[in-house]
Image: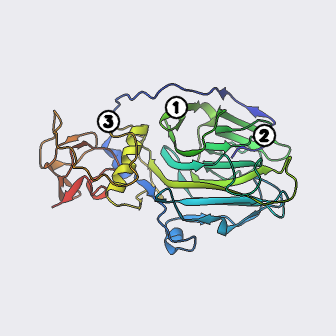
Amino acid sequence: MGRTRKIVLGATVASVTVALGVAATSSSSAAAACGALFDDFNYSSRTDPALTQRGWSIRTASGGPGVPGAGWRADNVTFPTVDGQKVAQLTATTNGTAAGTSHAEFSQSQRRFLAGTYLARVKFADAPVSGPDGDHVNQTFYTISPLAAPMDPAYSELDFSEYLPNGGWGEAGPINYQTSWYTYVPEPWYADNQHSQQARSIAGWHDVQATVGDGHVKYYIDGVLVGDHSGKVYPRQAMSIDFNQWFIDLAGRAAGATAVWQQSVDYVFHAKNQILTPAQATAAISSYRAAGTTHTDTIAIAGDCTVTTPPATTPPTTRPATPPTTTPPTTQPTTPAPSGTAWAPGVAYARGQVVTYQGKRYECRIAHTSLVTWEPPNVAALWLPL
């Protein structure tokens, strides 16, 4: 997470507004074993047993980042319905005093995430839902490993998005950061990182994506590339996936009425060791939801596989709020795969074709080009077991 940015080494990448281009690249069936995590946050409450069973934890321990002496409250993480979808919602509150300030953090705390594609749909806020405005609040989606010691050369952290609606760290708001970390020293503060920034509001729902592979960390907001970091800031060890909302400081905030800030997360997705375009990642989410899948986790804790880039496709680039009710397209691809062969990624399948996968037979429901993580057992919307 971004901290007091007094000394920052490495390059600062300017805001990028170039539209995304999709290029075809090679694929490898070896990546099929890499697995994926998808969670739609369909939980009853923070005490839902499935939450911990699926690796999620809510922070309650004191300490940084944020206002010294502030708390991290378990009940600041809830699972309401927002804009028609179940979400993970993080609430942070302050009355202008450390004792009256509370933060929220929600994470996949087991460190098993490194190369691949990360995507979350996050609702950022420019103003509190109640109370006075003006707080230096930070709304964040990131991955992180522990700092073993000051200047730890193996430290790894990727801040996919740190949104400061009212600014902070000497910058006026609204401003959004992407930061790739090499290392840092907590005291006296010293940071070695590379960052990009967008000096504009991103209030509302946004697709926040990053791809980690081939020595590059590429950051996207709503499918548009906003940062490309490389070199020594490329992560060197596995990390956890985290969301949090916290106050940088209480500067200029007099004690008084309590301000309540909320950040919502619609879903999170990680394709291990697979570099997906924004369109491919969004299509994967649409496929999960069309199949009624609210959670899947096929990422092995141990082992590894080759980083791959699936071939480009042209799936829909927007996510429907609910599964589509229209009749699926039936037009067959121009070069269909032969029926009865083994399923493979990067193949154009026509409706009605039959494939085998792990000794079982499946019939294609909807014409599509296959992707890693779209194996027949994982996408019932595309494949009918026979």
- Which element is circle 2 on? loop
Rendered residue at 51%/49% (across/down): 120
- Closer to the chain start, of discs 1 and 3, is 1
- Closer to the chain start, of discs 3 and 2, is 2
* Relative horizontal placement of residue 310, taking residue 208 as reference (left or right): left
Pick the front one: 159 or 101: 101
Instruction: Answer whether residue 106 is visible to the viewer in this image.
Output: no
| Above-or-below relation of 214 to 254 | above
Q: Position of residue 380 (x, y in %)?
A: 27, 58
Q: Position of residue 385 (x, y in %)?
A: 19, 61
Crowd rating for badge 3 (residues with CA inside 10 Å; few <14, some 14–19, many 20+): some
What residue would you read off at disc 2? 169
Q: Position of residue 62 (x, y in %)?
A: 76, 63
Q: Amino acid at mark 3?
A: Thr
Marks 1 and 3, Cα distance to the nearest angstrom? 18 Å
| Above-or-below relation of 204 to 99 | above
What residue would you read off at disc 1? 225
Q: Amino acid at mark 1?
A: Leu
Q: Amino acid at mark 2?
A: Trp
- Which element is circle 3 on? loop
Marks 3 and 2, Cα distance to the nearest angstrom? 41 Å
Q: Residue 313, which numbered label?
A: 3
- Closer to the chain start, of discs 1 and 2, is 2
Pick the front one: 246 or 308: 246
Rendered residue at 48%/58% (across/down): 301
